[in-house]
Image: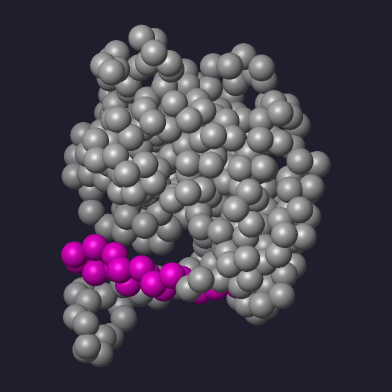
């Protein structure tokens, strides 16, 4: 089973227009509304691939109810916990130049809320399952909430994927997350190291099992192993893709989670499982760029990229 944790979900509203001009009025050609937040996007992609993920997180107010209803209608399983306050709304404006995203902070949560979430997560998970923790944390989140959940899941022989940023990314590495999936900007900001390969190595030194880094149009690279056995895998789409890139990283995480879910518990081959499917990570994230809203992907594009994307492997130099 794959369980995705979205501590700070959002009702995603996407506007598409030909050009975004600050200070001017716009006519919106296309409006999309979907259940969002990074972990929810991961679950939606997995569900579209025929998997049966479960969403966990906090929901509150009318926007929280709207998210729950959208997921129920889509057939995605959910185990959300109620909180006071209103679940946030995220607005994405997509034009010919790219995407502009406006993120609300989300409702405040308590230490007790996080304890309840961890209890539900660890009850649902069994050895060999995959736990995905994605996105930002809402106001009030204690600093040890995410790393504590990572440690408890790892002790339970659950494979853990974390896609976050800042100090939480560093703490997830130290807690022993099997896979971290930052983009290059998040990686540099968290580690304060300019070279992305050195920065990824720093996360491995802190305790992460594998670091998969999104490079935008340049694809992804993954670094795993220790010392002289450290390896680098790279893959990039064979064509330039345009559209809405906001869900590409979530689609990549979905591919990573699905790769991990194929392995037997206790084998310690998490890096190999993901590395062998790195072309799937690139293909699925590229297909998400072509889709109109985050959490979706274009099937023909995915199939085309999957057949044409190659993975290259090399030794890391330190």
Residue 231 visible in the snapshot: yes
What stretch of residues is rendered in magenta?
87-103
Q: In the rendering, at what x and y percent does residue 294 appear? A: 43, 58
Which residue lies most toward the top here?
228
Q: Residue at x 68, y 53 (%)?
A: 56
* Applied colour scheme: one colour
Q: How many marks are shown on the rendered structure? A: 0
Q: In the rendering, at what x and y percent does residue 167 appear? A: 47, 49
Q: For this rendering, which residue is in front, 293 or 148?
A: 148
284 versus 84 height, above or below: above
Residue 297 shown in magenta: no
Q: In the rendering, at what x and y percent does residue 102 appear? A: 39, 72
Q: Is residue 251 left or right of residue 305?
A: right
Q: In the rendering, at what x and y percent does residue 271 appear? A: 47, 21
Q: Residue at x 39, y 13 (%)?
A: 227
Q: Is residue 217 left or right of residue 44?
A: left
88 versus 8 height, above or below: below
Q: For this rendering, which residue is in front, 170 or 159?
A: 170
Residue 282, located in which quarter of the rendered image?
A: top left
Residue 49 visible in the snapshot: no
Q: State the predominant SS element of the stretch in magenta.
A: strand
296 versus 3 height, above or below: below
């Amino acid at each position: 089973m794959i369980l995705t944790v979205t501590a700070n979900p959002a009702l995603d509203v996407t506007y598409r227009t030909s050009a975004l001009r600050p200070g001017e009025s716009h006519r919106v050609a296309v409006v999309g509304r979907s259940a969002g937040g990074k972990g929810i996007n991961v679950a939606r992609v997995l569900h579209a691939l025929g998997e049966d993920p479960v969403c966990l997180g906090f929901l509150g107010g009318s926007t929280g109810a709207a998210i729950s209803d959208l997921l129920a209608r889509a057939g995605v399983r959910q185990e959300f916990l109620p909180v006071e306050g209103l679940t946030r709304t995220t607005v994405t404006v997509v034009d010919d130049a790219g995407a502009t995203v406006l993120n609300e902070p989300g409702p405040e949560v308590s230490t007790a809320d996080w304890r309840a979430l961890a209890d539900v997560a660890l009850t649902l998970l069994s050895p060999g399952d995959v736990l995905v923790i994605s996105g930002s944390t809402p106001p009030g989140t204690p600093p040890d909430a995410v790393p504590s959940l990572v440690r408890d899941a790892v002790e339970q022989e659950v494979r853990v994927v974390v896609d976050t940023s800042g100090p939480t990314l560093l703490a997830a590495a130290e807690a022993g997350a099997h896979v971290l999936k930052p983009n290059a900007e998040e990686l540099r900001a968290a580690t304060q190291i300019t070279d992305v390969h050195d920065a990824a190595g720093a996360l491995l030194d802190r305790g992460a099992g594998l670091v998969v880094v999104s490079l935008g149009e340049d694809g992804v690279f993954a670094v795993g192993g220790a010392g002289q056995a450290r390896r680098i895998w790279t893959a990039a789409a064979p064509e330039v893709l345009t559209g809405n890139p906001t869900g590409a990283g979530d689609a990549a995480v979905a591919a990573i989670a699905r790769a991990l879910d194929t392995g037997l518990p206790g084998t310690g081959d998490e890096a190999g499982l993901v590395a062998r499917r790195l072309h799937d990570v690139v293909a699925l994230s590229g297909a998400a760029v072509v889709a109109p809203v985050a959490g979706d992907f274009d099937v023909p594009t995915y199939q085309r990229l999957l057949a044409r994307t190659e993975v290259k492997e090399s030794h890391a130099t330190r």
